[in-house]
Amino acid sequence: MREFVLKVHQRCNLACDYCYVYELADQSWRDRPRVITPALWRAAARRIGEHAAQHGLDRVHVVLHGGEPLLAGTRRLISLIGDLRAAMPSGCRLTVGMQTNGVLLDDAMLDALAGADVRIGVSVDGVEEDHDRHRRFRDGGGSYRAVEKALRLLGARKGVFAGLLCTVNPAADAVTTYESLLAYAPPEIDFLLPHTNWANPPATGRAHGAWLTEVFDRWYAAPRQETRIRLFEDVMSLVLGGHGRSEQAGLSPVAVAVIETDGSIEQVDSLKSAYPGAAGTGLNVLTDSFDAALRHPGIVARQIGVEALAETCQQCPIHRVCGGGHYAHRFRPGEGFRNPTVYCEDMRLLIGHISRRLAADLAPLVTL
């Protein structure tokens, strides 16, 4: 494992209606401590350092997450980051990221995090009207204005801004959404399909795939690269025989550990959208190593590539590009995760579209 998600605060100051932590099947957050304690983050740091030393890792990435991580406060965050760095073995470089809704970012917080060499990603869903339709405060008020202010501050600091995360919304105009995100000059954008599955499939046919193809065409046809988009770059790489780095496409192993505020070691949070306990392993950093997590059947299933796919996926001509889609989106009650993604038709549409664009552009370069 080279990536660890550390939950530093279990609660959130927003009430986004599609949130897979608070609004969907798994409600385990209710029984966990509100904020991680120094004893627990130091135990987590020791386990990460131990794992890095045992496997001779030269790099480890830790993402500070929540809930909303900024609710933990500046002093706690800086102390935690210092303990993480101190626990790394010689020769292992630690990079630290944070995923935040941005509402609490101000100059003082940004100065502190920049000084601790933290790269910050912010969640934002396009223009104000579209963003505020889903990403609201608990009193129902929209969060866009607060997030926009934070993004202006973040954009002025070189080397701190990691990028933007945006949930695909077919009800919003695709190109308008993309160009509104470009206005903040993000180095990277992640477009994520909403976390749903066969228990409650999206009722929009191939609309998510069509939305993504519109964004792809705008991004791909630009006279220069305006930003990176991980999903598109992954599909392009996979179509050309390379590898991906996203959970949404490809068959690369996914070995990410999540550490909750009570020290529990879990699989990726997106699994919480499937059923209560789907992300659990029964392990805890106070008593267990990350090698023990690697032996958990749920994590093993993420490492075996094509063998984990449904038979219908294995017979599909694009299965090595699609990779069966996002693991959480494959869940079907009574059958588990060995199914095609609920976004199967959307992935077919997107991958086919990108493949044709690449083929057309590469054809003149092919010599016979």
Image (tube, rainbow, N blue to C red):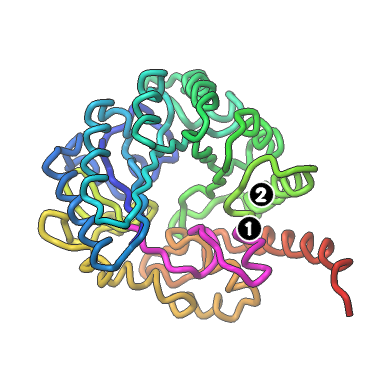
Q: Is mark 1 on a helix, strand or loop?
A: helix
Where is residue 157? Give x, y as percent.
Answer: 50, 27
Q: Which is more toward the observer, 201 or 360?
A: 360
Is residue 75 rendered to the left or right of residue 366?
left
| Lower position in the chain sequence, tag 1 or tag 2 | 2
Q: How would you classify the magenta stretch by its main secondary structure?
A: loop
Where is residue 314? Give x, y as percent.
Answer: 55, 79
Magenta region, residue range: 234-256
Q: Is residue 142 visible?
A: no
Please report the residue visible at 35 percent of the width from the left and 54 percent of the height from the top.
Answer: 60
- The type of residue carrying mark 2 is Leu
Task: Work out how far the residue at label 1 is from the one at label 2, CA to CA, in angstroms.
Answer: 9 Å
Q: Any mark on residue 243, and which?
A: none
Please report the residue visible at 25 percent of the width from the left and 72 percent of the height from the top.
Answer: 295
Q: Are marks 1 and 2 in contact (CB under 8 Å)?
A: yes
Rendered image quadrant of residue 39 = top left
Label 2 environment density (alpha carbons within 10 Å; few <14, some 14–19, many ≥20): many
Where is residue 307? Give x, y as percent.
Answer: 45, 80
Q: Is mark 2 on a helix, strand or loop?
A: helix
Is residue 164 rendered to the left or right of residue 302?
right
Q: On the image, numbered disc 1 is attached to which residue?
A: 346
Q: On the image, numbered disc 2 is attached to which residue?
A: 212
Where is residue 27? Give x, y as percent.
Answer: 27, 45
Please count the marks in the image.
2
User: Looking at the image, is 64 positioned above or below residue 132?
Assistant: below
- Mark 1 vs mark 2: in front: 2
Please report the residue visible at 24 percent of the width from the left and 38 percent of the height from the top.
Answer: 82
In the rendered image, the quadrant that contains the N terminus is: bottom left
Q: Is residue 22 visible?
A: yes
